[in-house]
Image: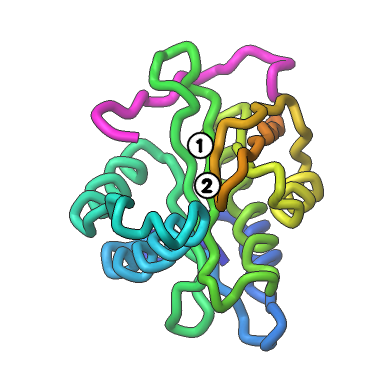
Amino acid sequence: MWCANDGTPKSIALMSVYQHATTVDATPITIRASRDEDVEAMLAIYRHHIARGVDPSFDDDIEAPQADDLKRRRRNMRKHRLPHLVAERGSVVVGYAYAVLFRKRPAYRYTLKHSIYVHPEHLNSGIGRILLPALIDACAAAGCRQMIGYIDAANTPSIRLHESCGFSEVGRLPSVGYKFGHWTDVVMMQRSLGAGGKTAPTVWPVLPTGEE
């Protein structure tokens, strides 16, 4: 169940879908808004994936984000109704997901790009399959109309996950990454939210400034 910081359910639909969600070890997974006390756990997950996703030999060259930076970014996103969610199993943060503006210019304020990170010890256990629908619902509730994800072309599980949640491949950037001694492609995937591009928006969301 995705809850606000005060514990209030954001929607009955989310409550019914996620309060019974379980993964391989049968422990319920709770989806909720992130809090400052989650920052260290999120940073540990992020650092692991960034370091292992390039090449272990580059560990010393990666500039790791600081806790205060992530806390400030998280608060700014929540202030402007941009979702920043964590998946929690018991008392352990096992994944997190967030969305930021695709571009900061006003014309693009209805389009978001998103990221999902899962704890390395909980990969392939269904965490992403719970987080992504919750993130989609949160983005739709914020009044946005499009979501975009950039995925390593070799990451077949992530591509399949996004397809199962309504995303389609809309572009490919060939040879833009260099990992483990070879060039990699990036796949751009997109899905509409709500009415998508079929109707004009009725409300202009507040445009975040200063950070992504």
Q: Is residue 59 left or right of residue 189?
A: left
Q: Amino acid at mark 1?
A: Ala
Q: Position of residue 66 (x, y in %)?
A: 22, 56
Q: Residue at x 81, y 50 (%)?
A: 164
Q: Is residue 94 visible?
A: yes
Looking at the picture, does residue 87 appear above or below residue 62?
below
Q: How far is mark 2 from mark 1, CA to CA?
A: 17 Å
Q: Is residue 67 above or below residue 173?
A: below
Q: Residue at x 56, y 30 (%)?
A: 144
Number of numbered discs: 2
As for residue 200 lying within the magenta part, the answer is yes
Where residue 50 appears, as percent x and y from the top left, is 44, 55
Residue 111 vertical placement versus 9 (above, below): above
The magenta stretch is 193-212
- Count residues near mark 2 (Cα–Cα under 10 Å), then give few for <14, some for 14-19, many for 20+: some
Label the magenta part by its dominant secondary structure.
loop
Query: Which of 93/185 is in front?
Result: 185
Q: Residue at x 43, y 40 (%)?
A: 82
Say which residue label 1 marks. 142
Q: Quadrant of residue 139?
A: top right
Mark positioned earlier in the residue sequence (2 or 1): 2
- To which residue does mark 2 refer? 115
* Point 55% across, 26% down: residue: 111
